[in-house]
Amino acid sequence: MRLVISDFMSLDGVVQAPRGPDEDTDGGFAHGGWSMPYFDPAAMGAVLDEVMQGTEALLFGHRTWQVMAAACQVGPGIRSPTA
């Protein structure tokens, strides 16, 4: 098995998903969503798609799991692809 880590990380080591400003305010962090202005879907979309196409499973941290579970709500009897 091969483990691949895909992170959004600044040059000074800040790791945070590219969501909104209220995503992670622990410890008074006031720069949530900092990477979105630099995210180019035309360039990064293909890269992320390639990474996901070769993925057999996803391992999320607690917060990411909560965000993904809320985003992937499906109807009764339909299994979420992230479950």
Image: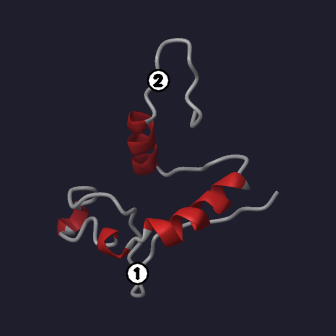
Circle 2: element type:
loop
The local crowd at label 1, few if under 14, some if 14 to 19, many if 20 or more residues have their Cα within 10 Å, is few
Ranked by sequence position, the earlier of labels 2 and 1 is 1
Q: Colour scheme used in the picture?
A: secondary structure
User: x, y (%) of residue 8?
Assistant: 46, 70
Rendered position, 57 above or below 40? above
Out of 79 and 1, give the one closest to the viewer: 79
Say if 71 sits above or below 25 in the image.
above
Mark nearer the viewer, 2 or 1: 2
Left or right of 50 in this view: 68: left
Mark number, residue 23 = none
Question: Residue flagged by tag 1: what amino acid is it?
Answer: Ser
Q: Which mark is residue 74?
A: 2
Q: Position of residue 41 (x, y in %)?
A: 45, 65
Q: Residues within 10 Å of mark 2 (few under 14, many from 20)?
A: few
Q: Residue at x 49, y 52 (%)?
A: 61
Type of amino acid under label 2: Val
The residue depicted at 35 percent of the width and 76 percent of the height is 38
Please give the residue where the numbered disc 1 appears in the rendered image.
10
The structure residue drawn at horizontal position 39% and vertical position 44%, both measured from the top left corner, is 67
Q: Quadrant of the C terminus?
A: top right
- For the view shown, which residue lies furthest in the right direction? 1
